[in-house]
Image (tube, helix red, strand yellow):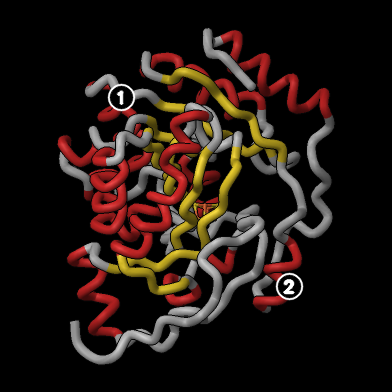
Amino acid sequence: MTGKVVQKPAALEAKSPFDLRVDLGKDVPETDVRSALASGDMGFLHSFTTGSTVDGPGVRVVAWTTGCMWRCLYCHNPDTWTMRNGIPVAVTRATEQLRKYRHGLKVMSGGLTISGGEPLMQDRFVVKMFQAAKGMGIHTALDTNGYYGERLSDAELDLADLVLLDLKAWDEAKHRHLTGREPGPTRQFAERLAARRRPIWLRFVLVPGLTDDPAEVDHIARFAAGLGNVERVDVLPFHQMGRYKWQQLGISYKLDDVEPPSAGQVERACATFRAAGLRTY
Ligand code: SF4
């Protein structure tokens, strides 16, 4: 590393990932960012949150990374798109933070989830965090869009006890419209996880008028069921909790008028996944 890394006093722990955080790593020189990404000795984190019961089994500590290569129209954390909006954190500091929780996590059958942003923008940091967690006997989960899955070797992939994988759309044009990128790498990652028999919890965000086309949902459901390693599907109803972030960041938000799906719409999507033989929550 070169130059001086400024460790801002911003608290690593946040009540929720919905806290808006910007520019916390803006003083980190570009050379240090590159070095951090190559070595994984430093990561950029929006925050740590504790007590999650929806980001993997049991009660979880979640490390929210910054940096994402997608631009999902419904993203509720656009402040995590830019890596330098996160707090620069030495992997040793993040590991010590995790160590504080290890007994509680075991008692509550929980573990560490690394989410984002897109964690695999910082794949070396993720690997080091998972190695540390496994060294403490802590369950690990990776919450990812899968686009950079090829950055992990098979051995590194096996450090994740569980992958929470987002499948956002099936049709290529729809996927590009929704995320800015093509769907192929995510599907290939899912197939690789299946070949290695690594468990997946599939996440699907239901947005009325955007992702609720029955044929689309059916394609995703049949693909997921065919993998053989999808343990459950979480149909996540779209919400507007992140709208204020788009406004405060000055980014054009296209879903202003979209209402969350009704219970009936959510149930219809769940029924499609169940009809394919999958369990929904
Ligand atoms: S992949 Fe996740 S973090 Fe990235 S833009 Fe989409 S919703 Fe936001």
Q: Secondary structure at mark 1?
A: loop
Residue ID at (73%, 20%): 268
Q: Is residue 114 above or below residue 138?
A: below
Quarter of the image where the C terminus is located: top right
CA neighbours of label 1 inside 10 A, class few (<14), some (14 to 19), many (20+): some
Tell me the amino acid under the disc marked 1. Answer: Arg
Residue ID at (27%, 19%): 197
Could you tell me residue 210's position as x and y percent? Answer: 67, 43
Residue ID at (53%, 29%): 108
Could you tell me residue 200's position as x and y percent? Answer: 41, 27
Q: Is residue 101 left or right of residue 49?
A: left
The answer to whether the beta carbon of the residue marked 2 is less than 8 Å from any atom of ligand 1 is: no
Q: Residue pushed farthest bottom?
A: 3
Tell me the amino acid under the disc marked 2. Answer: Gln
Q: Is residue 261 left or right of residue 53?
A: right
Could you tell me residue 69's position as x and y percent? Answer: 41, 61
Q: CA distance from mark 1 to mark 2?
A: 39 Å
Name the foreground residue: 126 vs 266. 126
Disc count in the image?
2
Name the foreground residue: 37 vs 207. 37
Quarter of the image where the N terminus is located: bottom left
Q: Is residue 122 left or right of residue 73?
A: left
Which residue is under mark 1?
A: 198
Badge number at residue 247: 2
| Disc nearer the start of the sequence (1/2) | 1
CA neighbours of label 2 inside 10 A, class few (<14), some (14 to 19), many (20+): few
Name the foreground residue: 32 vs 195. 32
Q: Secondary structure at mark 2?
A: helix
Could you tell me residue 204's position as x and y percent? Answer: 58, 34
Residue ID at (28%, 58%): 125
